[in-house]
């Protein structure tokens, strides 16, 4: 049984297909989300359907794979069963927990109530509606937005924070140039707050410097060494007591495993609630239970003790490894330790600009980095239709910037 249809869960199931096992994959969504492109949905660069693909379609031809739509709420490792929110109970012989993480607000007062996260497809849709709605409000009632100059604050200078900041600046530009919204582009602001000394802390310093310089050159107000003490509906209070007004606050400050199924496992938990694992990615005392992806403190390997970063490549590789260990156990073979093969990191800063950091060698940046980033993301998108649509959208957007999916689509029509 595999719980979670993210990168880790889908990778595990892919490596169990056509094997002499019966696989049940459970997820509260009936689709797989390509999370690295959520910021594009949030800033109206792509539609939600461009970054999501039905789980049943992914495994539709696999006769040994069954999908169960539901939220896994509890696991009984002694009885070897998982209980769903609808009361259903599913028994398992082997369990792969790939439930990912949730937004971590770092105990900042008001952050969970007033800041908008960007971790799920629902988050991206909500953020897009809020940002576009804000721009329409600034056009209609400029006196409420500093005479038509709204401020957007992004908290967190990791890859998500850098990407959303660059995309927001571009959205402001196209809103004025293409949509003729009556906002002041010279005084409208995107402010990126990072508590650390540099951006992209998981990257090499050169990449962080390039990201900072590029964002600044495009009009983003980058503030390093700046913490957030409180978030309210109309802005944030910084760690030094300064009040920073904001029309929208985007939270990219980190993730936590707390609140997920993995957090309920009877195992030690480390930073951010991540499950501490054995070298083969199993749970201590329960060799039939594996935790993969963001949910686990996945070790680099025998030569490096610290956990891997919570990125897609770790999820894909750990999911594959767990699947192989299940097969080894069924064949009566000993399990093997996981070793992460670092293929590098990538982050886009906007049109024509990205950083691609390989494990060894130079850092590719600018247009070359952007093309490398584009190619890699297209390769990993699930489904031919998604690749084709994204390629067409990005190619057209690269050459110009026509009217895209800048639609405010609410789940409920208040006028009905």
Image (cartoon, rainbow, N blue to C red):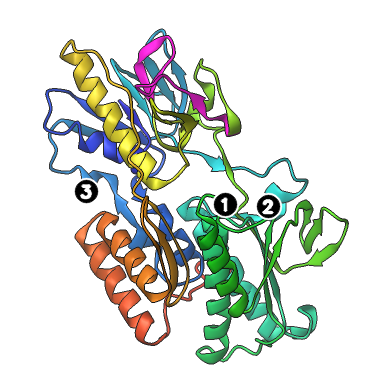
Give the secondary structure at mark 2. Answer: loop
Give whichever of discs 3 and 2 has the lower sequence position: 3
Q: Foreground residue, 387 or 347?
A: 347
Mark 2 → mark 1, Cα distance in angstroms: 8 Å
Residue 10's spot in the image, x, y percent? 29, 40
Residue 196's spot in the image, x, y percent? 68, 52
Residue range (magenta): 272-290
| Label number found at residue 171 | none
| Residue 253 against residue 341 in the figure, above or below | below
**Residue 319 colored magenta?**
no
Tell me the residue at 73%/40% (across/down): 107
Give whichever of discs 1 and 3 has the lower sequence position: 3
Tell me the residue at 72%/69% (across/down): 247
Tell me whether the residue at label 2 lies in contact with that at label 1, contact meaning CB atoms closer than 8 angstroms: yes
| Label number found at residue 57 | 3
Q: Tell me: 408 left or right of 189.
A: left
Q: Nearer the viewer, mark 1 or mark 3?
A: 1
Q: Foreground residue, 415 or 224?
A: 224
Residue picked out by circle 2: 196
Local crowd size for mark 1, using a 10 Å CA cut-off: few (<14), some (14–19), many (≥20)? some
Mark 3 → mark 2, Cα distance in angstroms: 42 Å
Residue picked out by circle 1: 201
For the C terminus, the image quarter is bottom right
Residue most toward the front? 361
Mark 1 → mark 3, Cα distance in angstroms: 37 Å
């Amino acid at each position: 049984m595999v719980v979670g249809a993210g990168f880790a869960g889908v990778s595990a199931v892919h490596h169990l297909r056509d094997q002499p096992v019966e696989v049940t994959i459970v997820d509260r969504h009936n689709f797989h989300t390509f999370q690295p492109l959520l910021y594009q949905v949030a800033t109206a660069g792509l539609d939600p359907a461009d970054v999501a693909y039905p789980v049943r379609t992914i495994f539709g031809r696999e006769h040994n794979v069954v999908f169960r739509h539901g939220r896994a709420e509890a696991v009984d490792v002694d009885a070897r069963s998982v209980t769903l929110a609808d009361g259903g109970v599913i028994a398992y012989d082997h369990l792969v927990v790939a439930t990912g993480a949730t937004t971590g607000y770092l105990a900042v007062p008001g952050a969970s109530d007033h800041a908008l996260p960007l971790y799920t497809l629902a988050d991206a849709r909500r953020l897009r509606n809020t940002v576009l709605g804000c721009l329409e409000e600034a056009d209609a009632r400029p006196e409420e937005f500093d005479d038509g100059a709204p401020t957007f604050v992004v908290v967190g200078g990791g890859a998500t924070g850098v990407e959303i900041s660059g995309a927001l600046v571009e959205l402001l530009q196209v809103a004025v140039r293409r949509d003729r919204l009556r906002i002041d582009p010279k005084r409208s602001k995107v402010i990126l707050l990072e508590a650390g000394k540099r951006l992209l802390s998981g990257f090499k310093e050169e990449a962080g410097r390039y990201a900072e310089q590029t964002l600044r050159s495009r009009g983003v107000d980058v503030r390093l060494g700046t913490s957030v003490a409180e978030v309210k509906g109309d802005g944030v209070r910084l760690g030094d007591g300064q009040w920073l007004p904001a029309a929208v606050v985007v939270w990219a400050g980190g993730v936590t495993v707390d609140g997920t199924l993995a957090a309920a496992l009877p195992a030690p938990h480390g930073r951010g609630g991540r499950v501490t694992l054995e070298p083969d990615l199993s749970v201590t005392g329960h060799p039939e239970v594996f935790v993969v992806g963001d949910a686990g403190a996945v070790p680099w390997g025998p030569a490096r003790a610290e956990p891997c970063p919570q990125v897609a490549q770790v999820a894909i590789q750990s999911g594959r490894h767990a699947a192989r260990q299940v097969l080894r156990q069924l064949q009566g073979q000993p399990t093997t330790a996981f070793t992460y093969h670092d293929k590098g990191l990538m982050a886009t800063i906007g049109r024509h600009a990205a950083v691609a950091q390989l494990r060894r060698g130079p850092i590719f940046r600018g247009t070359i980095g952007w093309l490398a980033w584009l190619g890699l993301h297209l390769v990993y998108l699930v489904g031919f239709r998604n690749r084709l649509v994204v390629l067409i959208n990005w190619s057209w957007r690269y050459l110009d910037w026509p009217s895209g999916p800048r639609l405010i689509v609410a789940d409920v029509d208040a006028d009905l």
